[in-house]
Amino acid sequence: MFELKERDGLARICELTTRHGKVTTPVLLPVVNPNQLTITPREMRERFGVQMLITNSYIIWNDKKLRERIEGSDVHGLLDFDGPIMTDSGTFQNYVYGDVEVDPKEIVQFQASIGTDVGTILDVFSEPSFTKEETQKAVDVTLERAKASVALKGDMLLAGPVQGGIYPDLRERCAKELSALDFDVHPIGGVVPLLEGYRYSDIAEIIITSKMYLDPSRPVHLFGAGHPMVFPMAALLGCDMFDSASYAKYARQERLMYPTGTRFLADLHDLACDCPSCSRTSIAELRQMDPAERMRRIAEHNLHISLREINKVKNAIHEGSIWELVEMRARAHPALLQALKVLKRHAHFLEKTEPASRKGAFFYCGPESCHRPTVTRYRERYFQRYRKPETKVLVGFSEATKPYGRTYAKEIEAVSSKTHASFVVASFFGPAPIELDEYYPIAQSVIPGEVDAEAAELFRETMERHAHTHGYPLAVMWDGVETLKFLEEVAPGGGKFDVDLLRVRAVLDMQFGKGAADMLDGRKVEIFKSPRTGKIRTVQIDGVHALSMRAHDGRFTLKMDGARLLMKAIPPPAMRVVVEDEPAEFSRKGTNVFAKFVAGCDPEIRPGDDVMVVNTKGDLVAVGRATMNSDEMKAFKRGIAVRVKDIED
Amino acid sequence: MFELKERDGLARICELTTRHGKVTTPVLLPVVNPNQLTITPREMRERFGVQMLITNSYIIWNDKKLRERIEGSDVHGLLDFDGPIMTDSGTFQNYVYGDVEVDPKEIVQFQASIGTDVGTILDVFSEPSFTKEETQKAVDVTLERAKASVALKGDMLLAGPVQGGIYPDLRERCAKELSALDFDVHPIGGVVPLLEGYRYSDIAEIIITSKMYLDPSRPVHLFGAGHPMVFPMAALLGCDMFDSASYAKYARQERLMYPTGTRFLADLHDLACDCPSCSRTSIAELRQMDPAERMRRIAEHNLHISLREINKVKNAIHEGSIWELVEMRARAHPALLQALKVLKRHAHFLEKTEPASRKGAFFYCGPESCHRPTVTRYRERYFQRYRKPETKVLVGFSEATKPYGRTYAKEIEAVSSKTHASFVVASFFGPAPIELDEYYPIAQSVIPGEVDAEAAELFRETMERHAHTHGYPLAVMWDGVETLKFLEEVAPGGGKFDVDLLRVRAVLDMQFGKGAADMLDGRKVEIFKSPRTGKIRTVQIDGVHALSMRAHDGRFTLKMDGARLLMKAIPPPAMRVVVEDEPAEFSRKGTNVFAKFVAGCDPEIRPGDDVMVVNTKGDLVAVGRATMNSDEMKAFKRGIAVRVKDIED
C-alpha cells in the first residue's frame, strides 16, 4: 500500500495506494466539514490540485440529515470528490466537546460502510496536561480499541494513532504495540495543544520517539498539523501526512498563514503574496470586501500557501536539501529554532536513514548545522574506519578552498620532496586527510569564513580526539618555508607523494568499512584518471575493472569484479544484502531487489550505499545501490530495496 | 524629492517624486533593453505593478534606429511607459565591452533631452580586482565628471554613483564629495562582479561605508543588484533602489530565481511556486513549451518573485521585523550568512538609526541576533544610564517567563519581607532589573530555551561588567528558601517592595538619560495603573498629568507638564529638537516639525524617541515623537522630523 520512491533521511517521497487512486506523500489533506464548505472539494481538486481529503465520520454519523444524504451513495458522493478520502472518528471532537457517544467498533464499521479510503479508530486523545496515570489510561484504552477495530476494517485502510502525551515510554509502548497490528497508517495523536502552544520541541521529541518504534513501512500522519511553519521539520522527522482545518479556521479570524508565521490582515501593510487568490486583489480591495467573501479569499490563500510549502518540502527531498530548508524555516519562530536544537540529541538515530551522499552541496546554516547526521557520520567513520598511511610525519593545513589537494598542491609537493609525510586539513567536518578531499561531504560543502562558537568547540574536541587516536611520531601545522626546513632536518628522506593510491585505499575503508582496502593487497592496481578533471575514474585490479569513482561524491561504484575481491576483505554481513534464493536468481539476471524478498542485511548499510547482493548461501549474485537501510528493508512489503547496477556478463 | 515615510533602522520606506509621478521605495527597477523586450513595459505596469523602469541611454544614443524612433517623442514614448524612467549612461557597457566612446557631458545632456526622469553620469566602473591606484583613478575621474555633469542636469534628477572598489577610504572620499554636489540619487557602483562571486561580505562593507558618508536624505541605489537573495540585507543597510536585468538574463539560461537561491529548470522536480506565471502551468508543460515561450514564462516568474520579495521587505519595515527577515534569508547561502556575521562590527553605526522600540517582538534567530543594534543599545544604556536603587542586597534570578515581575512575584515578596533588596534577572539582553521588566526590549522578546555559545559568552561578559559597574554590598543568586534564611540573618530589616516608583525612575533614566528621574525629587508623585493589566498608565507630579506609559513598550509618552519638569533635570541639548523661531510658533499650535526647519538636535535622539521641541531660545513649544535621528533631521529637506503629540492647552 505504501512504497518508498525518493528520500532524504527520514524525509521521504512515497506512494500510497488507495481504492480511489494513488497519492504522493508528503501530502496535506484539507479538512472538509460537510456542513460548512468554505472551499468545495471539487474546487480543491480542480483549482488547488488537492490529492486527498479528510472529513469527520462522527459528524456524519451524528447528523441525521447527512446520514440521509449519504444513503445510497458514499462519502465521495456526499462531498462530490472522487479522490481518496480519509475519515477521522470523533476523537478530536471528544477532546474539544467531551460529548462523543459512539461505540468504538460501530464508528469503524460506519466508516467502512460509507466507502472511506482510510478510516481511523476511536482512540483516546492524550492531552499534554494529563498526568502519567491519565495518559497510561488513554494509551491502554486506545490499544484495546485498536485490537478490536483492526478485525473490522475490511477493504478499508485503517489508521491507528499513537497516543502517549509527553511521556516517551508511553509513546514507545503505544507505537510498538500498534506496529504489531495490521494498521495501514499511523497518525501521531494528541499534538494539537502542543502546536497551539508553540511547543515545537515537545512535538519533535514525540515524532522521533514514535518514528523509532513504528513500523517504518507505514505512513505517519501528524494529526492536526495544518500550519506550513511545521511541515518542513515534521517531514524531516519522517511525517508523511498532514491535515489542515487551519486554512479555514485562521481565515475566520482574518489571519493569513505563511511558512514564516501568521499575520492578522489588520496588521499587514501589503499582501506581498503571489498566490492565485492574492495576486488578483490588493489589500485595500480585500479589506473592503463583503466579510464572507474576504474570509473565503483568505482561506484560499491559506490553502495555496500550505500546499505550496508541501511542494517545497518535496523539492527539497528530491534535491537532498531538506536540512537546509528546515534550518532556514526554523528562523520563523524561536520555538521552532529550539526544536531544531534538540535534534542533536538524536543525531545517531537520524544517521541511520541519512543517505550516503546528497546531490547538492552541504550548506552551513548556523550552529545547528554541525549536528547534522552527515557531520556526525563523517566524524564517527573517520575514527572507526580511516587507517592512516605509514608515514613518519603528519602535516596539517588550515581550512581552504576545495578541493584541498589542489589548493595545497605546491606545499604537498615541497614537503614530500624533503620528508615522508601525510597531510590533513583541519576542516569543518573534522580532520580531512588530503586523500579524502573529494569524498563526500568534504568537497561538497560551503562553510562561511567564520563559523559559530559551538561549531568551533566541537571542531576543537574532534581535533583533540584525532591527536589521541592517530598517533604520528611527528605532527606539525604548515607554517611556510620554516616548516620545510624543520622537516628536512628532523625527518629527512622524501620522495613523491602518491595521492591516487592513498585515495583509493582511504575511500574503500571509509565507504565499505575498515579493512576494505585490503582487497588491493598483493595485487596489481592500475588507476585511470579523467584527462580533463584529473579525477580518478576507474580502478583496475589484476587487469579487471573493479571500481569506478563517481565525480560528484568521490565514492566508488562497485563492479562485480570488485565485489568478488571486496567480499574476501570484509566478512559477512558487511555490505551484504541477503535475498531469498529464488528472487536472487532474478537479481543475478539484473532484476532489482524488492524489499519483500530481503532475508537479511548488514545493519551498517545506509540508503545510497553500494552493496553486494547475495543469496542465502552467501554467493554473490549482483551489486547495486541500496535505497533503504536494514530496518526498512525488513519492514517494507512493496518497492525496491536495492537497485541492481552490475551483474555477471 | 525624497521623503521618509516609515523606517526600521536604516531600512526605510520613502517617497521619491519624479516628473512622472511618485515612487515608493524600496523599489525594483526592471532593466528594459529597448531592442529586446522580454516583457513589455506596458505589461510590467499593468500586470506586474512595476512602478519605475531603468533603460540604458547609451544604447539609445549609440543606435541610429532607436534615435530616429525617439525623435519627436521621448524615452517614455519609445518604451510605451508613462511612469518614471531612470537611465544608465554606458558605464556598465564600458566595463563589459570596453568600447564606450561618448563624451561624459554629452550623455548627460542626451538623457535630459529624451525626457529621462533620473539620469546617470558616465562614471568609471571600479572593479574589485583593481589595484588601489587604478581604483583611485576611477574615483578621481568619476568625481571630475560628477562636478561637470551636475551643472547640466536641468529639470532631470541626476544620479552620482559611489565608486571606490573594495577600498573603504576611497568609497568614503567618493561618498563625501558626491554628497557635497547637487545629486538626487546615489547608486553604489562596481558591485556586479562581487554579486556574481557571492562576495556578500564585501558588498555589505561597501554599502555600510557608502551609507556612513552619503547624505542620508538621498536615495541609494545598489546598481546591478537584481537577485531577490540580496534585497533584504541591502534594504536593512539602507539601499532604497535596485535594478534587475537578472530576471531576463537568468531566464535565458532557464534559471528560476527565488529568495532562497537560483535553480535550473532541469534540476527542479516541481515549480512549487504560486506566482501568476507558475500557477497556470505544470513543470511538465513548461518543459515541453516552445523555448521562446518557456523563456518568457521563466522571466515572468523571476520578475514576480523579485517584486514580491521587495513587498516582503516593505512589510517587514512596516512591522519592524527587518532583522528577523534578514537573519532568516541569510540561510539561503553561507556567503550571505558570512555577510550577516560581519554586521556586528558596525553595531554602533547601525544603532544610530535603530528605532527606540518596535511594534513586534524581538525574535532570536541565531548567534547573530545578539549583535542586533537593539541588544547593543540596551546593554550600553544599562551601563550608562541606569542608577541602582539604594539597597543593601541584590538578588539575581535566572531567565524566566515574561514579565519577570509576575513570574517572580512570590520570591520578591518573600525576600522583601526579610531584607531591603533589589532584584535583577540575568536576561538574554544582559542584566534586567525587575523594575525594567516591561521596558523594551526586555518583555517584548522571544528567546529559545537554549541560546548559542556566542550569545552565552557575550552574556557572561556583560554580567561580569555588571558586577564591576554596580557594586552592591551583597549579591546573591536566588536559590529558594536557603537564600531567604541567609538574607534574614546577614541583612535583616525588610519592608514592602515598591516596584512602581522604581519603575518610573528607571524608565525615566533609561529613556531620557541619566538624571531624568531627578525631575521627581521633592515632588508629590502619584501613579495610576490599569485595573485590568496592573500596568502603569499615567504619572501625576504635583497633581498634574506629566507622563503616560505605553503598554506595548513600557516607555513614557511625554506630556507638556512632564516636559517642563524634565527640562530642569536634563540640561540642553538633551532630548531637545531646536526649531527655527517662526516655524516653532506653528508647532506651539500643533503643527508637526518639518525637517527643513530643524536648527539643531541632541545627537543622542533616535527615531521613535519622545522629544522636547524648543525654539532657538530654548523655550519649550511642544512635545512629540522623533521620526529621525539628528543627522537625518539636518539632511532631509522634505518630510516630518517630529510628530507633535502635546502642546499647551
Image: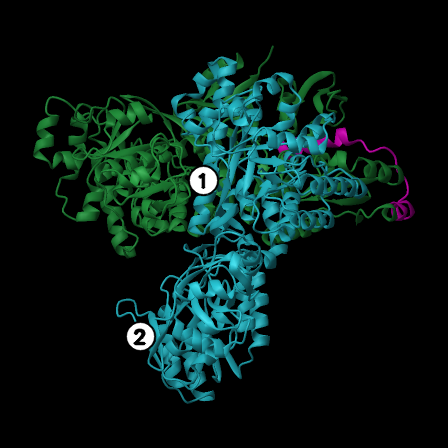
Chain colours: A cyan, B green
**Residue B516 visible in image:** no
Residue type for callout 2 = Phe
Residue A72 part of the magenta segment: no
The rendered magenta stretch, by its main secondary structure, is classed as: helix
Query: To which residue does mark 2 refer?
Result: A528
Q: Quadrant of the C terminus of chain A?
A: bottom left
B511 sits to left or right of A434: right
**Residue A229 visible in image:** yes
Which image quarter: residue B359?
Answer: top right
Q: Residues within 10 Å of mark 2 (few under 14, many from 20)?
A: some
Query: To which residue does mark 1 refer?
Result: A311
Question: Which residues are the magenta region?
Answer: B484-513
Residue in front for this viewpoint, B31 or A215: A215
Residue in front for this viewpoint, B384 or A445: A445
Q: Residues within 10 Å of mark 1 (few under 14, many from 20)?
A: many
Is residue A71 depicted above or below B339 in this figure? above
Residue B494 part of the magenta segment: yes
Which image quarter: residue B491?
Answer: top right
Residue in front for this viewpoint, B78 or B87: B78
